[in-house]
Image (tube, helix red, strand yellow):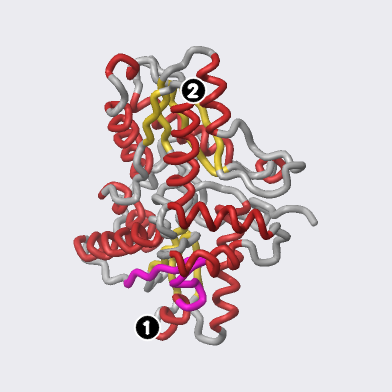
Amino acid sequence: MPERYDGLLLVAFGGPEGPDDVEPFLARVTSGRPIPPDRLAEIADRYRSVGGRSPLNGRMRTLRDAIRAELDRRGLDVPVFWGNRNADPLLADTVAAMRDAGVRRALAWTASPYASYETCRRYGENLEAARTAVGPGAPLLDRVRRHHDHPGLINPAADRLAEALDRLPADRRDRAHLLFSAHSIPTALADTCAYVAQLRDTARLVAERVDPQRRHDHEVVWQSRSGSPQVPWLEPDVGDRIQALAATGVDAVAVSPVGFPVENFEITWDLDVEASGRAADAGVAFTRAAAVDDDPRFVSMVVDLLVERLGHEPELIRSGLGSLGVPVDACSKACCPGPRP
């Protein structure tokens, strides 16, 4: 039988909204990790160089309001809440507000459709920690299924990449190399989850729609690496790959940040600043696709993932375009294990 959900919770990483928020945000992100002070200062300077503001919170507000409107359009009386891991509104505060609003059981959508420790299991741990902090009366929290190949993600990403290709110089457009970018993770963690396979599946699906004649080469690249340089992480880095492609004669790239459905600072810095700068230095024309969070099809997808579990629309197909199969509602206890001590 379908579960009786009386709330929808949107969960994101969070980001600062002004210069005064940068240090508190970074303190939460790095809590318990031995980050050298000069490294933290470097990251803080990056945020300040763009006004100390991440686009993520603003985009999450817009997404929340659009989802509320879509639920109203479908005649579904389900309140929508939003909480972050590392910035206001913090998850524990949001879960407390849900309790106070009378929510008993909610479904949580997290701002990444992919399976890995950071994008899957850790969000589950954060939700449980928030419930524990709230205490008695905290609503039960389940999560939506993984959805890396949902049409509501794939089709908007393809359209955004096609728009980006159109912005390249006309004389280079047809030979542009397509790069699909996502957050790098340690290879030891990648070996224990479906993260890489899902991202490659997503990249293939988007590339097939943008380039059905297969005129463009495409591949998955990685960004936002952190941690000890002695620990192997997924490669190649997007900037390194652009430089290597330039050495082979490639003179145009189009980057799709498929690993980040919601516009955020990592896209702004790693792609718009660093990767585009390296492309310019190498004489490579660069364009970047916009994130998909403000596309109506993406909004509809989030509601579809809720409706799947409500059972209000039995004719709704559990959509999945890829080759890995449609995931089950709940992950197994063994999925996406964390780093070993």
Residue at screen point 60% across, 58% down: 41
Give the number of the disc on residue 236.
none
Q: Which residue is mark 1?
A: 101
Q: Relative to residue 60, is residue 83 drawn left or right?
A: right
Quadrant location, the N terminus: bottom left
Q: Can you see residue 119?
A: yes
The residue segment tinted magenta is 79-93
Residue at screen point 42% across, 40% down: 272
Quadrant location, the C terminus: bottom right
Question: From the viewer's perspective, is residue 177 above or below residue 234?
Answer: above
Question: From the viewer's perspective, is residue 266 above or below residue 31?
Answer: above
x and y, in percent, of residue 165 in the image:
32, 27
What amino acid type should be assigned to the residue bearing mark 1? Ala
Give the number of the disc on residue 282.
2
Measured in 3D between alpha carbons, the distance from the residue under mark 1 to the one under mark 2, in whole angstroms, is: 55 Å
Q: Relative to residue 42, is residue 179 drawn left or right?
A: left
Residue at screen point 38% across, 15% down: 175
What amino acid type should be assigned to the residue bearing mark 2? Ala
x and y, in percent, of residue 96 in the image:
47, 81
Q: Circle 2 sits in a helix, a strand or a loop, which is it?
A: loop
Q: Is residue 304 magenta?
A: no
Question: From the viewer's perspective, is residue 277 above or below residue 39?
Answer: above
